[in-house]
Amino acid sequence: MRIALLSYRSKPHCGGQGVYVRHLSRELVALGHDVEVFSGQPYPELDPGVRLTKLPSLDLYREPDPFRTPKPGEIRDPIDVLEVATMYTAGFPEPLTFSLRAARVLRKRLLDFDVVHDNQTLGYGLLAIARTGIPLVTTIHHPITFDRRVDLAAARGWKKVTTRRWYGFLAMQGRVARRMSQVLTVSRSSARDIATDFGVDPDRIEVIPLGVEPEVFSLPEQPRVPGRIVAMASADTPMKGVATLLEAFAKLRTERDVELLLITRPKPGGRTERLIDRLAIKDSVRFVSGLSDTDLAQVVGSAEVACVPSLYEGFSLPTVEAMACGTPLVVSRAGAIPEVVGEDGLCADLVTPGDVGELSHALAALLDDPGRRHRMGAAGRRRALDTFSWRAVAEATAAAYARAVEAGGRREGTDADADR
């Protein structure tokens, strides 16, 4: 099967979208399919046999100069004008503008592909692609409506206005999602939220959990660092629960010799750095970022305990990766995390999201019990190997493609659905 896989941004090693694109495309090729990835910046890291077609945006949010002003010579066409104008008015343009660029390119290459697979873009350009009659499947990892609610709750004054504007693209994503005949998602929790927040018919949603590479994320060869706690956060936002973890860690720090290793890149002078200074724990907290999968696995495997304090997760790849490394976990009872670790407590201790005292107590209890850490790590490794496989993800996704092709790209949505 010839597959066009669309992803408006595909940052390697950080955030679920880039990881999903890389591993899914590799396994689809291993199954004998032909895969071409279409992506805007940041571009994905892909394996041999997977082709990449770059659909460059103006890259307005690149480091170290986010929200930059492009030079006049960079503006190439009306889509670029729309992109920069949306940024200037505090909106986030990439899902819309990438979808328009993808529609423009695919319109000339329809005979090259059997199916188009969109990775959470949900821009209006997808409707133009669907109108050509080519079979179209979309993955929604989770509706970003939860992120909006958390960020709005944390915003004050004028920041609340600009935050609401930033998330303005969600109205478009909901309209487009309701017109998609075949929606894939990564957990039962996400499926419920997609149906509730985007109004997608539950009968159109199929759950395909994500995977892990057990050969890379494996048991550590070196002894774990005593007192080390590791946490991965793909973004410096309230939803990731880093503030809760820092406050819990500060309590632990007064009682024992512990170290917190955060796999993230905080915003300079942002809320995380300010909180670390206020809690006076700067000497015990370290940040690392930009790691390869091998380096990431070594870091996760070096810790005595891993923590996922998020207020919500559509799936939580960091949780599965820690389990595969045999690292015992303390996680929030939020979103899909209980689905990933299981509710029986064998692979992780589950705590109330945002509860500093409960998180601090759970971390302390696990740090003080090496036998339980060993048992929990072994159970997590078994669950990761038995339940989460990128090959299984690719097989189930290819089956979804086959159903889309068999249906001839028929869209089950209606205009009435789109306006709901």
Image (cartoon, rainbow, N blue to C red):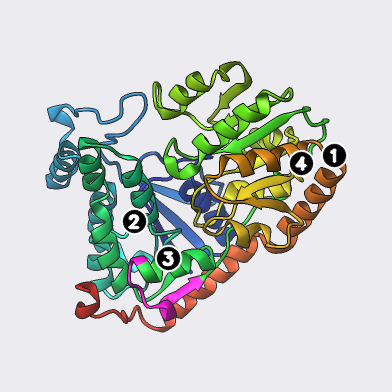
Label 2 CA crowd tier, 10 Å (few <14, some 14–19, many 20+): many
Look at label 2 and name its amino acid.
Thr
149 left or right, relative to 82: right
- Name the secondary structure under disc 3: helix
Q: Going from the N terminus, do you reach mark 2 or mark 3 first? A: 2
Q: Which residue is mark 4?
A: 366
Return the x and y of residue 217 as percentages of the image width and height: 70, 44
- Name the secondary structure under disc 4: helix
Return the x and y of residue 242 as percentages of the image width and height: 51, 36
C-beta proximity under 8 Å, tags 3 and 4: no
Q: Which residue is mark 1?
A: 370
Give the distance between the C-alpha atoms of the residues marked 2 and 1, in whole angstroms.
44 Å
Q: Which residues are magenta?
A: 197-206
Q: Which quadrant of the rendered structure holds the C terminus?
A: bottom left
Give the distance between the C-alpha atoms of the residues marked 2 and 3, in whole angstroms.
17 Å
Residue at (55%, 18%) from the top-left corner? Answer: 280
Which of the two discs, 2 and 1, sits closer to the camera? Answer: 1
C-beta proximity under 8 Å, tags 3 and 1: no
Residue at (39%, 21%) from the top-left corner? Answer: 269
The reply to whether residue 390 is in sight is no
Q: Which residue is mark 2?
A: 121
- Name the secondary structure under disc 1: helix
Residue 62, quarter of the rendered image? top left
* In magenta segment, residue 209: no
Label 4 CA crowd tier, 10 Å (few <14, some 14–19, many 20+): many
Which of the two discs, 3 and 4, sits closer to the camera? Answer: 4
Residue 170, quarter of the rendered image? bottom left
> 74 and 92: which one is in front?
92
Look at label 4 and name its amino acid.
Leu
Residue at (49%, 57%) from the top-left corner? Answer: 314
- Name the secondary structure under disc 2: loop
